[in-house]
């Protein structure tokens, strides 16, 4: 073994043992050279090797970092990734809500292992500190702020949100920001602002069930567009849909799509925004998982490339900081006034205590530190979930390897019915999100979405193995 | 002067001086007889006289109480009450939202005397104690409650709300209660649950502008029904409307209607519910002012007479306890599942901290004491506002005398344009709610709604006098 191979092996072991974790910075070339007594060029050679193995990657002017998606443990064959989706052509009326409610309703029992949940584990959030911010924020509150918190919402909070975007490279105007009752309200208001009953809206395939429910509620038609499990919506297919249909809006998740976990590369996001601008079609961007990236840099939202105010960028603190506080927002571009008015008409205002608590928390600092911990935690759990799936799921299973968020999209052998699997899992005290709820035509009948964001490790791994065994029993031979 | 007249005079002076206030209990017959050394029958005669003068009234098995609506101060001619409204027959499309937003937007400056505001003064609310309940509630929170707070909402809070109704004589089932983001969301969800675009909905004339905006947003047609300034909607006119139109819902405020302040008598509410049951038309009951009664007893909501689950009773803590917390609810009867699903689809859940704070506050006790103070305060301010109007408004002015809430409906001489008055008042630092925003056809062009719920007394009376002088200048000779 050559000297650079030995050094590469040392680093690889640190990574496999978990001492160096996805997103961690690898010791710099100068540092390694000094502490190991080897030449800088030897260190470089070792790092090139590790990079070729997919274990680390370079970040310009910053050094080397442990990759989010680790290659398989030797001796274990990793499941393949799902294939890009192939939705039916044409538009379709949506009538999925009853099924969604049936599935979600059954998953709300306290005792269940929540593999079907939409939220990560509550132990990952600074709930104690937020509670202190609540009382601090409200005691210092000028009562006038109760009036001032009418839409667009608390001024200081909106400034802090705009600042956070700015520090991460996306320009968001305070004037276009409206605080909402979570991202769910933001997304629904945006859709209502730009459509009328009967209009056609583009969604991904598969797509977040709440998008389908929103379309159903507003009597809209869905056009589902092919989506790649790693790179997001297929732009050629989208261009075709835009040419064929009078599309009034696109509701997409360019970063860590729910349920696929796909992340559109930066250039693809730029091309998406340009394509929609050519057609003057508004983009409703759901970015609630944008902060949960495993790579060192926050992926820019599509909003970052918007020069025409056509992107309505929606997000919230519910998935990354303060579940239950119901503080979301939209940077609504040219639709800001319309959305603000709809908010006033339908729910009047967001809760003042929640807005004050978040504003206080952000002013105190520490948000970025919390996010780093949360991301590391989720990245680790994904590794373990993938390992359990490789070991316990039936042959022919495909699974996504998202670079962020807390969902895996698992494609089971075609004969497995996910609703049947969901019912069997429930009987074993485990919830699942069956693939049927992620498409208007229920085509993902052999897929499930797995939430790996609950850190009760042993219980989680055992439940996931149980699901694998149940799926195996449902798959023939 | 006879002995009983002398005693009546003493009590009358106590009332006029403010020592005994609207809603206060007058000393009992036995007490007066003992302390004054007069016979019980003399005291009874005195109280009969005071009752005939309208100063006090008897409450069965409880004694005598100071009346809410005092007769005029001698020497001052009180303005007449407004006449019942006479809306146009037929249904009408609604396009009022732009005007409403223009008016409301201009009234949001901090420096204004808020006669046009929809909220009472914040100094009337226990904001400090609520802030303590926030931190207490959240620190004791089992994190599972963050999940459990999904619709229908926090279980303990829903029980406390049902209990409060029960103690005041109205049976509300915990199972039909859904916590919402204020009453505004509850009302909008109810309307959405029972209508489709193009449907016809009955509202009062005049009606709360937010009801008109909700109809406009959902593309519904309004049928405005004649409404009496003291007794609420005209049931004969309503019966006619139900016979003539395929009405899909009624959105009404049976207690302390906004803007009229009218209170439907109990028997009339019972008849309303029976009439709607015969037509199987759901009633969306907006009861946000129901707790703000000046008479000793809380008026029962229409919901109290509902045996078929057709009444969707909406209310909130925003006007009577916790402005800005955005905790409202609906007891939705047979529509509970539909409303709960709409809530989940559009805003997911109500904020957990707000729900916890209210639940904590209610558990600690003292809500009824707070309400009594608030009611006394509002009743006193109404007296003063009526006196200022009698003194400073032009001849021909008519004004309502509501038995609760914090709005006066002022009908000015027909030549006064309320929008012009609103603009002139704004220039003087005073906001107003012009009559035009309370009807789809803007027919109340010579009316204004005055908020008397802001206790900064001198500033308030001066502003109101200014409005009277401005109106006088706009009225010819």
Image: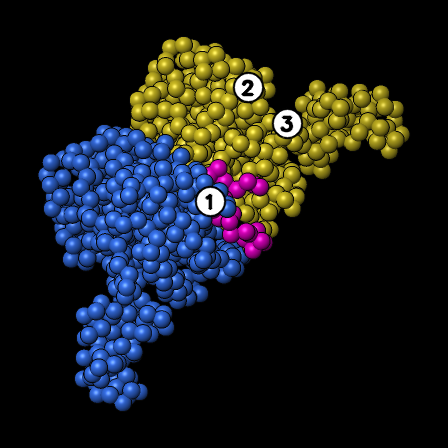
Chain colours: A blue, B yellow
Q: Quadrant of the N terminus of chain B?
A: top right
Q: Quadrant of residue A338?
A: top left
Circle on res. A429: 1
Q: Chain of mark 2?
A: B
Residue A260 on the magenta segment: no
Q: Chain of mark 1?
A: A
Image height of B307 relative to A336, above or below: above
Tag 1 and tag 3 share a subunit? no
Disc 2 from disc 3: Cα separation: 15 Å
In the rendered structure, the answer to whether residue B353 lies left or right of residue A348 reads right
Expressed as whole percent of the image width and height from the top left, the position of residue A71 reads 25, 64
Q: Which residues are magenta?
A: B136-157
Expressed as whole percent of the image width and height from the top left, the position of residue A251 reads 25, 43
Tag 1 and tag 2 share a subunit? no
Circle on res. B169: 3
Q: Earlier in the sequence, mark 2 or mark 3?
A: 3
Task: Identify the element where label 1 is drawn.
Answer: loop
| Observer-nearest of A378 and A427 | A427
Task: Identify the element where label 2 is drawn.
Answer: loop
- Callout 2: few (<14), some (14-19), or many (20+) C-alpha neighbours within 10 Å? few
Furthest residue in direction bottom, as rendered: A37
- For the question of whether residue A88 can be seen, the reply is yes
């Amino acid at each position: 073994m050559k000297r650079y191979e030995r050094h590469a092996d040392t680093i690889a072991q640190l990574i496999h043992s978990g001492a160096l974790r996805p997103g961690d910075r690898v010791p710099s070339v100068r540092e390694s050279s000094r502490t190991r007594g080897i030449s800088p060029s030897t260190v470089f050679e070792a790092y090139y090797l590790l990079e070729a193995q997919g274990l680390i990657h370079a970040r310009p002017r910053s050094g080397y970092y442990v990759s989010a998606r680790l290659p398989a443990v030797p001796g274990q064959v990793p499941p393949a990734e799902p294939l890009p989706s192939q939705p039916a052509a044409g538009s379709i009326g949506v009538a999925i809500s009853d099924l969604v409610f049936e599935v979600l309703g059954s998953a709300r029992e306290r005792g269940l292992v929540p593999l079907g949940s939409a939220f990560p584990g509550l132990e990952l959030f600074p709930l104690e500190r937020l509670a202190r911010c609540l009382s601090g924020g409200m005691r210092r509150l000028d009562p006038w702020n109760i009036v001032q918190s009418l839409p667009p919402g608390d001024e200081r909070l909106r400034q802090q949100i705009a600042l956070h975007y700015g520090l991460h490279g996306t320009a968001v105007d305070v004037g276009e920001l409206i605080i909402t009752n979570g991202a769910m309200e933001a997304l629904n208001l945006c859709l209502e602002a730009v459509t009328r009953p009967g209009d056609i809206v583009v969604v991904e395939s598969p797509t977040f069930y709440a998008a389908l429910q929103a379309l159903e509620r507003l009597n809209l038609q869905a056009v589902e567009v092919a989506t790649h499990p790693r790179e997001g919506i297929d732009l050629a297919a989208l261009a075709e849909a835009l040419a064929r249909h009078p599309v009034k809006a696109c509701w997409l998740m360019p970063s860590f799509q729910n349920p696929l976990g796909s992340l559109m590369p930066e250039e693809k996001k730029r091309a998406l925004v340009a394509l929609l601008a050519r057609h003057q079609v508004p983009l409703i961007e759901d970015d609630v998982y944008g902060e949960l990236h495993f790579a060192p840099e926050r992926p820019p939202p599509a909003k970052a490339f918007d020069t025409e105010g056509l992107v309505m960028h929606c997000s919230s603190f519910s998935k990354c900081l303060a579940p239950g506080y119901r503080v979301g927002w939209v940077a609504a571009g040219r639709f800001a006034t319309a959305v603000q008015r709809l908010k006033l008409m339908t729910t009047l205002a967001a809760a003042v205590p929640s807005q004050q608590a978040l504003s206080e928390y952000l002013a105190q600092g520490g948000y970025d530190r919390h996010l780093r911990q949360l991301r590391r935690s989720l990245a680790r759990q994904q590794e373990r979930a993938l390992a359990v799936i490789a070991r316990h799921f039936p042959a022919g299973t495909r699974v996504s390897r998202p670079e962020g968020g807390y969902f895996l999209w698992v494609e089971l052998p075609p004969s497995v019915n996910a609703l049947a699997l969901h019912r069997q899992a429930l009987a074993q005290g485990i919830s699942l999100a069956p693939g049927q709820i992620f498409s208007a035509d229920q085509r993902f009948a052999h897929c499930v979405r797995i939430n790996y964001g609950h850190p009760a490790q042993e219980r989680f791994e055992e439940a996931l193995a149980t699901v694998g065994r149940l799926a195996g029993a449902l798959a023939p031979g």
